[in-house]
């Protein structure tokens, strides 16, 4: 029964790692350098756990599993801190070039919105 749980845990950690790799490589996931670093650590940590569990767990593997769990914990902490940092910054306003120049009425009608 323990071997079944070990195999299920190994498979799930591998699937989580593959999902994180997909998120890292996807252009649709809007993350910065900090969050991407955390995602990379999470992916490597889950891959290491999966590899160790598939290989069979012995007493000597405890240190390797602790290192893999450290990667997961560090990655999750970095992702959370990056998310909080991203949410704490006010949204930056994107300005158009036309916002900084004076226009007459003929030119003003060509600008999106039609007024200042």
Image (cartoon, rainbow, N blue to C red):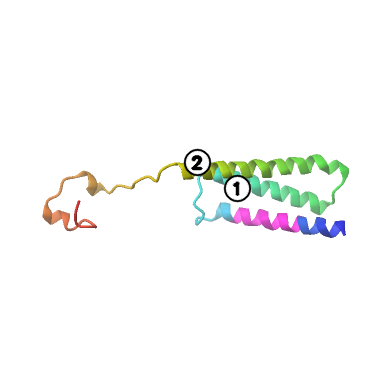
Residue 11 on the magenta segment: yes
Where, by quadrant of the figure, is residue 81 drawn? top right
CA separation in Å, label 2 and label 1:
16 Å
What secondary structure predominates along the stretch shown in magenta?
Answer: helix
Q: Is residue 27 toward the left or the right of residue 70 in the image?
A: left
Q: What span is in magenta?
A: 10-22
Q: Residues within 10 Å of mark 1 (few under 14, many from 20)?
A: many
Q: Position of residue 1 (x, y in %)?
A: 87, 60
Q: Residue at label 2? A: 85
In the foreground, 73 or 88: 88
Local secondary structure at mark 1: helix
Above or below for 58 versus 110? above
For image coordinates 39% across by 46% down, the residue present is 91
Q: Nearer the viewer, mark 2 or mark 1?
A: 2
Q: Position of residue 95 (x, y in %)?
A: 30, 47
Local secondary structure at mark 2: helix
Q: Position of residue 62 (x, y in %)?
A: 82, 42
Q: Is residue 31 toward the left or the right of residue 73 in the image?
A: left
Q: Are marks 2 and 1 in contact (CB under 8 Å)?
A: no
Q: Is residue 83 toward the left or the right of residue 114 in the image?
A: right
Residue 83 on the magenta segment: no
Q: Residues within 10 Å of mark 2 (few under 14, many from 20)?
A: few
For image coordinates 12% across by 51% down, the residue present is 104
Q: Position of residue 22 (x, y in %)?
A: 59, 56
Residue 7 visible somewhere in the drawing? yes
Q: Is residue 56 toward the left or the right of residue 29 in the image?
A: right
For image coordinates 49% across by 52% down, the residue present is 30
Q: Residue at label 1? A: 39
Mark toward the start of the polypeptide (2 vs 1): 1
């Amino acid at each position: 029964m323990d071997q079944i749980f070990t195999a299920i845990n190994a498979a799930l950690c591998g699937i989580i790692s593959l999902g994180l790799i997909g998120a890292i490589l996807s252009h649709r996931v809007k993350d910065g350098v900090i969050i991407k670093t955390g995602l990379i650590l999470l992916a490597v940590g889950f891959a290491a756990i999966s590899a160790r569990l598939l290989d069979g767990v012995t007493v000597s593997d405890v240190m390797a599993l602790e290192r893999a769990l450290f990667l997961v914990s560090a990655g999750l902490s970095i992702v959370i801190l990056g998310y909080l940092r991203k949410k704490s910054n006010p949204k930056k306003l994107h300005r158009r070039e036309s916002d900084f120049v004076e226009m007459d009425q003929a030119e003003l009608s060509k600008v999106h919105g039609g007024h200042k």
